[in-house]
């Protein structure tokens, strides 16, 4: 006999999982609120886009780990290992060519913990849960926000017009996009769940990879 639960109804998992198609690419990180243009030409991924457009319009962008990139022969490279955190995106726009290829524009919805699962399609699938993040301390929020604003302004042609209370995580992701970091520097930032730590890591990367000086 199963035990009688202490409460009813049973508590729901605060991070419900979704089964999503996965598009794995090396060196690609889909950040929240980012628009990522993609050219889809392989048959398995054309099948994936067909299915996604017939469904909820969402997919997971998997980042292939360095050294796992596909090669021309063998079977292992058909399923290269991926980073355990993926950006989940929704197709905001698509164009299909007469020969069946796609041009899509993927809008980043958020970071997700992923676990690969079996797939009955040509493409891979993952079970994805929203990443649980650690909120920023209110005592540090203003200082971190000001530092991020200054870093962003230093990489823009003109000062950015943003609300005073723009979330720190949005500023962090916006700065990260502008840095164009190598994969080994990007992975720890992308997977960091503590918002303040992520912001500090991004600011350190900003200092380590300064913008080119204009003549």
Image (spheres, rainbow, N blue to C red):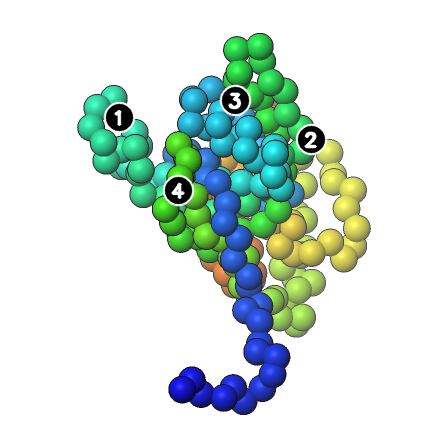
> Which circle's residue, 3 or 1, is located before the other in the chain?
3
Circle 2 crowding by C-alpha within 10 Å: few under 14, some 14–19, many from 20 = few
According to the picture, the residue beneath numbered tag 4 turns out to be: 119
Residue at coordinates 73% horizontally, 54% vertically from top-left?
A: 166
**Between marks 3 and 2, how big is the CA–CA gap?**
29 Å
In this picture, residue 164 sits left or right of residue 60: right
According to the picture, the residue beneath numbered tag 1 turns out to be: 71
**Between marks 1 and 4, how big is the CA–CA gap?**
22 Å
Q: Are marks 3 and 2 in contact (CB under 8 Å)?
A: no
According to the picture, the residue beneath numbered tag 2 turns out to be: 157
Q: Helix, strand, or loop for circle 3?
A: strand
Closer to us: 108 or 141: 108
Q: Nearer the viewer, mark 1 or mark 2?
A: 1
**Between marks 4 and 2, how big is the CA–CA gap?**
46 Å
> Which circle's residue, 3 or 2, is located before the other in the chain?
3
Q: Is residue 66 visible?
A: no
> Which circle's residue, 1 or 2, is located before the other in the chain?
1
- Residue 169 x %, y %: 62, 54
Q: Quadrant of residue 31?
A: top right
According to the picture, the residue beneath numbered tag 3 turns out to be: 39
**Between marks 1 and 2, how big is the CA–CA gap?**
40 Å
> Which circle's residue, 3 or 4, is located before the other in the chain?
3
- Residue 179 x %, y %: 52, 38
Circle 3 crowding by C-alpha within 10 Å: few under 14, some 14–19, many from 20 = few
Q: Are marks 3 and 1 in contact (CB under 8 Å)?
A: no
């Amino acid at each position: 006999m199963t035990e009688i639960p202490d409460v009813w109804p049973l508590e729901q998992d605060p991070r419900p999982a979704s089964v999503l198609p996965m598009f794995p690419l090396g060196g690609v990180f889909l950040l929240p609120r980012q628009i990522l243009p993609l050219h889809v030409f392989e048959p398995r991924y054309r099948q994936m886009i067909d299915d996604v457009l017939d469904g909820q319009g969402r997919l997971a962008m998997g980042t292939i780990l360095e050294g796992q990139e596909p090669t021309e022969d063998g079977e292992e490279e058909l399923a290269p290992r991926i980073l355990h955190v993926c950006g989940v995106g929704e197709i905001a726009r698509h164009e299909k060519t007469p020969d069946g290829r796609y041009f899509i524009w993927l809008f980043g919805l958020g970071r997700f913990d992923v676990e690969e699962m079996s797939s009955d399609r040509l493409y891979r699938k993952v079970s994805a849960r929203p990443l649980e993040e650690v909120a920023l301390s209110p005592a540090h929020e203003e200082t971190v926000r000001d530092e991020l604003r200054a870093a962003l302004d230093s990489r823009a042609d003109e000062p950015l017009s943003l609300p005073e209370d723009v979330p720190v995580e949005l500023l962090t992701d916006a700065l990260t996009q502008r840095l164009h970091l190598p994969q080994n520097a990007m992975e720890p930032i992308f997977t960091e769940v503590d918002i303040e730590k992520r912001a500090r890591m991004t600011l350190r990367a900003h200092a380590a990879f300064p913008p080119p000086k204009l003549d």
